[in-house]
Image: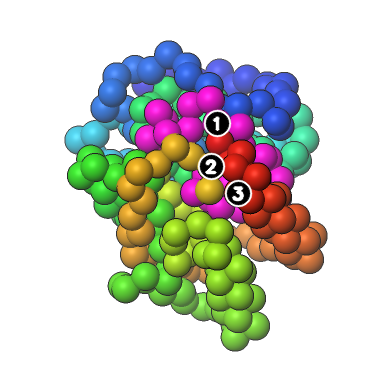
Amino acid sequence: MPRTRATVCRWRASNATRTVPRLSALVISVVVPTYNEAGSLPLLAGRLAAAMSGRDWELVVVDDGSPDGTAELAEELAATVPIRVLRRAGKAGLASAVIAGMKLARGDILVVMDADLSHPPEVVPALVDALDAGADLAVGSRYTTGGGTMDWPMTRRVVSRVACYMGSVLVPVRDATSGFFAVRRAAIDGVRLNAIGFKIGLEVIARARTKRIVEVPYTFRDREHGASKFGRREVGQYLVQLGQVARDKLLGRLR
């Protein structure tokens, strides 16, 4: 496959997701936001290629100016893996990166996952199969039967459970903070997603036009490469996001 030439995207966080030309109804776009993920990206691309064998798919890497050369490495990988690279000038946040990647993606099925291998690429086909079976949104879930977490200290387990409980009051899933999901493009076309914080999954679950949502179990593993980007700022943004979703739900303007 010819090497993809990276582009720089200027966009407004409040923009609605919009329809773009697609390759075919069978194309699956896997959107991965990155910042300093050069250590894990080749492993992710290789495992995804193996898991998606026989399917029409693309990997959309949205890089926020990683100083470790993540974007350049992604372009090199495009010689053997169907990768498209979107460069952004600075670190603008995970949620905004996902929204930008969705706009660039050409598939009718959009999969969102992290680059650090905490979301197993081998589960992506199960998410896609759930949509093929009739769901509009399939959420990778740590907290449904068969799911779980590994390598987490007790403090993080408690924080995650509390955050999910708070979110589940507003959306009909157990793992409300999941960042690993697949959604039909038709379910989010024209929907205005708020690019706040890093819990884009909550935004999609709450605001997408869905009739059926399913949870697909998986085991979350702590990142294998690099350092976690989770901190107090992200917790504060999640609380703001919860407040915005609750307000819009109460006012009947989620979509």
User: Looking at the picture, how far across and down is residue 53, in whole percent?
Assistant: 23, 39
Q: How crowded is mark 3: few (under 14 residues within 10 Å), some or many (20 or more)?
A: some
Q: Nearer the viewer, residue 150 or 73?
A: 150
User: Looking at the picture, how far across and down is residue 88, in whole percent?
Assistant: 70, 30
Quadrant position of the C terminus in the picture:
top right
- Disc 1 marks which amino acid? Val
| Circle 1 SS class | loop
Q: Nearer the viewer, residue 72 or 58?
A: 58
| Circle 3 SS class | helix
Res 207 label = 2
Q: Nearer the viewer, residue 230 or 79?
A: 230
Vertical side of 164 occupied by 126: above or below: above
* Residue at point 78%, 61% (across, down): 236
Between the C-alphas of marks 2 and 3, the distance is 9 Å
Task: Identify the magenta region.
Answer: 183-205
Image quadrant assignment for residue 14 = top right
Between disc 2 and disc 3, the foreground one is 3
Q: How is the image coloured?
A: rainbow
User: Looking at the picture, how far across and down is residue 111, in whole percent?
Assistant: 42, 41
